[in-house]
Amino acid sequence: MKSTIYIFGVLFIIIILYVGTSRFAGVWLVKEDRLVNADAIVILMGGISSERVLQAADIYSKGLAGKVIIVEESMGSSKALQARGAHILSNSEQVLNAFISLGIPADSIILLAGDATSTQIEATMIREYLANKSEVDTLILVSSSFHTRRASMIFRSAFRIAGRPVKILCSPNVYTDFDAKKWWKSKEGIQTVLFEYIKIANFILFERKELKYAVR
């Protein structure tokens, strides 16, 4: 049943993209909010992205937030390496070091320990971290521009499910190569847009309900 719903969801998205909305499809994925002073900047991982680091550093330098939050990203079998006495810097640690090199004080960067493999897990872990910090009511999300719509949906749902009124603002990445208005002119653009819509459908149909559970 689940696979059938998923297939119909994917087909529905493909039809929407095909019938007259292709030019708008890329633009809709990019969610840009008017930024105001916030309690923290959340940089979403997904590998080491110099684009996201630069975007977050720019926002911090403007004085829009005094803290940067990073959730530790899963590094696969790195724990097995550590068990054998070898240590490699995680993606999250490298991003943290980059922030420090760009002038952000170490005590302004919060690295949440974890093993995140998705935006949903990042959202849930940040929600748990802020559970007893009622003074925090505004976050700025930094991610790839095409990911901002889905990221906003995930974070808003995570806090809404928890009954926590937190304003989520998105800052699309200005350093990206993704062209939202002409995405269909390159193979990479087509793949990016189609996969992102499939991921949005997957979140709406299946993953959203998982946000009510805490990460342990």
Image (spheres, helix red, strand yellow):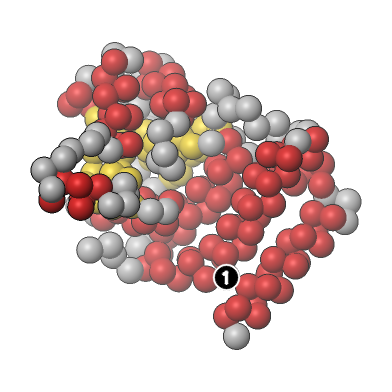
Amino acid type at circle 1 is Leu
- For the point 49% across and 26% down, which residue is it? 51
Label 1: few (<14), some or many (≥20) within 10 Å?
some
Nearer to the camera, 180 or 169: 180
Any part of residue 3 in sight: yes
Image location of residue 136, percent across then percent down? 29, 42
Image location of residue 157, percent across then percent down? 46, 59
Q: Secondary structure at mark 1?
A: helix
**In the image, residue 107 above or below residue 188:** above
- For the point 30% across and 29% down, which residue is it? 94
Figure quadrant of residue 44: top left
- Give the left or right position of residue 57, taking residue 134 as reference: right
- For the point 44% across and 22% down, which residue is it? 54
Furthest residue in direction bottom, as rendered: 1
- For the point 63% across and 73% down, which residue is it? 6
Furthest residue in direction front, as rendered: 84
Nearer to the camera, 35 or 154: 154
Nearer to the camera, 191 or 13: 191
Figure quadrant of residue 17: bottom right
Image location of residue 2, percent across then percent down? 57, 80
Nearer to the camera, 62 or 91: 91
Any part of residue 59 in sight: no
**In the image, residue 108 above or below residue 141:** above
Question: The C terminus appears in which quarter of the rendering?
Answer: bottom left
- Give the left or right position of residue 183, taking residue 128 as reference: right
Question: The N terminus appears in which quarter of the rendering?
Answer: bottom right
Residue at label 1? 205
